[in-house]
Image (cartoon, rainbow, N blue to C red):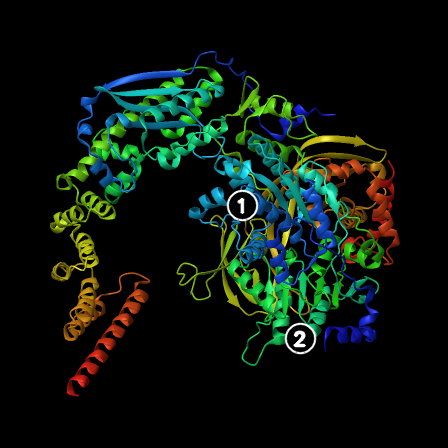
Amino acid sequence: MNLDQLIGTLRADPEFMGNVAHWETIPPKQAEYAPFPDGTDPRLIEVLRNRGIYQLYSHQRQAIDLASEGKDICVVTPTASGKTMCYNLPVLGEIMKNPDARALYLFPTKALSADQVAELYELIEAMHVDVKTYTYDGDTPAAARRAVRQAGHIVVTNPDMLHSGILPHHTKWVKLFENLKYIVIDEIHVYRGVFGSNLGNVIRRLLRLCEFYGSHPQFICCSATIANPDKLSESLIGRPVALVDKSGAASGERHVIFYNPPVINEQLSIRRSALQETIALASRMVDNNISTIVFAKSRVSVEVITRHLKERVREPLGNSGKVRGYRGGYLPSLRREIERGLRSGSVRAVVSTNALELGIDIGQLDVCIMCGYPGTIASTWQEAGRAGRRKNTALTILVATSAGLDQYIVSNPSYFFGHSPENALVHPDNLYVLMNHLKCAAYELPFREGDSFSQGVSTAELLDYLAEEHVLQKTGDRYYWTAEEFPAADLSLRSVTSENFLIIDISNSSDVSTIANPKVIGEMDRFTAPMLLHEHAIYLHEGQQYQVEKLDFPEKKAYVRAVDVDYYTDADLNTSIKVIDVLKDQEFASYEMAYGEIVVTWLVTMFKKFKLDTQESLGFGEVNLPELEMPTEACWWALLPSMTSGYSMDDLQGGMLGLANALREILPLYLMCSPHDLCVQYHVRDPFTRKPTLIVFDNYAGGIGLSEKVYGMKNLVFEDVASLISKCPCECGCPSCVGPVSEVGPNGKQVAFELAERLKQL
Amino acid sequence: MISLREKLKMVKAGSSETKKPAEPQKNPLFMEENRVPAAVLTGVDRITLEEIRACEPTFTGTQWNLSDLLFLDTETTGLSGGAGTLAFEIGVGYFEQDSFVIRQYVIRDYPQEREMLEAIIALAKEHGTMVTFNGKTFDLPLIESRCIMNGLRFSFAGCPQLDLLHICRRVFKLRLGRCNLATLENAVLGTEREDDLPGSQVPQRFFDYLKTGEFGLIRDVLRHNYDDVLSMPKLLSRVAEAFRAPESLSYPEDIYGVGRTLMRGGHVRQARECYRILGHTKMAGHARLRLAESYKKDRDWEQTVSVCERMIAEGENGTWPYIELAKYYEHIQRNLDRAEQMSLRALSVLLNRMPLQNGSKERDQAEINGLYRRIERIRRKKERRDSNGTV
């Protein structure tokens, strides 16, 4: 069966259609073309003709025209619409006209930059012109770095390297800074939250240096579809942009199906597991040899799905290479191999985390299945864009989980298919972020009195403060860096530490002390390791199960051994919160609200075992690991006795749990952040406020301004919480509103609703 | 509402009590000059361009006059080498008539940096040849970077450079391991510093000076830098001597280092001489290996064979001399019987060797396989030869 036939079969399948919450058919779109602009270098035109490109898409032409007018631009285009031409053509044109000109390309990840350079190389080689393009990142050999600094026309890097490897050493990059003509920022929508706030400041530093060296670069930004690409670009680069958002690219017919697994327990409103449904749907594709990408949200689900699909395609000789897993933690060489397999077609199905969401070139597939809503509309379209060749039909199936956000999306298709309501938020003036970068900037070039680094916060006041702290020395009208430290060294743009744990396979050794042929099979970040690599955890890698034999925390090494068991493990995380400082507070009739700084402590104390196919619990074990601490910002509501005195302890407990669960579902929609960016907790008796308290905190060290925004919204959010609870058809609570009745208790839903109604009022 | 100032206090919890910074310095750029009689630096005047080229094959200078040399060493605010690190002190030394002049500059505040850099640029232009200890990678690029920051365009690219760290590493690394200046002074010059300021404390001294205006804090830095500058011509004199007369060196490791440097610089005859001197020392095995390699490269078979046979007699370098001889007999002398015999002897050396450490087993196995292939090939050649012979 080909895809069109399969879609027909699905439509005629009453069991399948019974679970379809929405089926959107997006008609095919004709391409809109425009000729190459006058004055385009004939060598460029010829090379493109040789590749079958005789004219430009209308949006490419528009972008090139705006760039040649000297405007900063932001191009918003769907996947596979030739967006790289929107920056490669102006950049190559400029360098071929003026060999001294330089360009800087920024990609969010190393893998992406490697990919884009390969494409650019091909163009340059085919033209036989001397345009040197180099990648400059952590993998660039020391010997090659000199050549990149001196001779690179186009320097391809990532924000982290720009921040710690290029800007602090700008005197070695004089050629680049003096002649910088274009700065290209691809995948700009990725730079939200803390990453974006950091990047905004890195760009401020970059532009400061350009001014010192006398260059005035233009920006070309590219974004996936979000509500505010222009506003995002503007807050990142600090100046207005011209928006190019009408794609002229052709696209085939596209089917988007919202698939809601059937309810198996009416009363509890429990649905069949999205994971099982995803496996069943993906198996149908694999059986028909239709090329498919499956997106799952966690590493564990990627491995579980991969394992099932591999079983499906296993040949008599045991070869199951047609199905591959793909996620962070796989070594780069393995990833490259899988990408090649996808492009060549030898890999027919890949199961991935959002690692493949960004523009890594894997060719185009036919079907995209998402196990769970990816969290934002922009991510969903990017993942969906992995399926669909220019003229063929494409199918995307979103399999909803029981989570409130998923249920909201599949039951409100207009929210999803209407104009994107998602705003990517950045907050470059977050005081932590700003201060860190101001130090880096002062290190890079002394500030003068009257210099302005950020529009929102008084630079003079910050500088004077640093001078008082003897980080800067003010002499005459200048502020000089006066500390030994290298400020960029300790600052990570992604705010997660770079200290990864190594995962070492010791299947060939009898015990940890005598390791023969140890093999590093992957890595994991510091905050995830305690959850997934504690001793006795079952760690899945490329479908193979491993048991963690030893976790050497100080050495950051986990020793694992291949096993074959019928269960997986899931660790329990204990979170405790200490208030450090109250920055703002207000008292209302029945509650107090505050915003301030806290320290969160995480501790994994135990793990549970679950049977692989039925998910039934098989017992638990202890975990002995050190705590992890993170300072951040929080917003909290302390409920006064006037609100809570009427409830029994049990009811209040259930009600607050329900309220916390509902809040967790609603807040990401409000703040346009991923659910993971925030944590919601409750304490029936809070050690700080000594009252029943609901706490929301930013899940990033130092905070990224989300809690402050929550504080600013006051009671607004509880209107939606109350409406979510009252509109939910379940009797006494389900995973889509306050959580299952087994957790919140028989009165949990009602109490949560009553509390929300009170919190609605000031 | 909380003021920005209060927020800043919170961002940096536990901020220290703030002292009022000292009044900006009105004093001019600090400069101090000391003269040492050149006679104290014995041997410096004997150095020739040939010796320098032998020490440093990459040296680009076309002549050698003592008065052209500018010895330079900096004291900096850190080691990161980024744009925010600067040299607050620069010490230089040069020969003037019968004296070695040591001139030291210290900036009293940041704005004086430009003036100091201009003074250094003038001295560099006047003398032309830069002599440093680790200056190629640290001090000189740092000064260039600071020039850019101060709007001065200057590069040392036009000056011939001599980096004593690189030269000393080649000669003394094998014996000393670490080659920092203190180790070299101790082991090569036989001097020891008293109450020397550890380098790690240098940046803080400057920051404290900026805060307090107490120049006494800088005095220790100046003394440390003075010693650094003065050690450079002494070291230069010693290494030049080592290349002039390697046989006078007391340590075989040092002679071996000189030999390797000479060989790299193309001074084959002198290099072989070094290796030959080592024939009765603990470096004999290594030296003979280098010697044989050098003869082989020149296709001097007689010498190659003689050195290899000596190695075999001394039991040096494992299978290497056997295999080299096997190659020689097979390809050069076309004596297949001798070639086969040598290969078999190599094999017996290998097979009789006990595996000493983990992993060597695999390497040995690879070597054994290689030898089997060699022996088979030689035997095939022999068969072909014999059958041709009967026809």
Can marks 1 and 2 be said to lie on one chain?
yes
Q: Nearer the viewer, mark 1 or mark 2?
A: 1
- Mark 1 to mark 2: distance in Å? 44 Å
From the top left corner, tell me how far across and down residue A208 is, in percent. 60, 32
Q: Is residue A386 left or right of residue B21?
A: right
Q: Quadrant of residue B344?
A: bottom left
From the top left corner, tell me how far across and down residue B281 is, in percent. 13, 49
Residue nearest the viewer, comparing A461 with B6: A461
- Kind of residue at disc 2: Asn
Residue at the spot of label 2: A289
Residue A185: give its label.
none
Residue pictured at 63% horizontal, 41% vertical: A199
Q: Earlier in the sequence, mark 1 or mark 2?
A: 1
Q: In this view, does A397 lie above or below A646?
A: below
Residue A153: give its label.
1
Question: Is there a contact, CB below 8 Å, between mark 1 and mark 2?
Answer: no
Chain assignment, label 1? A
Instruction: Examine the rendering and report whether any part of residue B32 can be seen.
Output: yes
Q: In this view, does A394 lie above or below B375?
A: above
Chain assignment, label 2? A
From the top left corner, tell me how far across and down residue B239 is, in percent. 21, 36
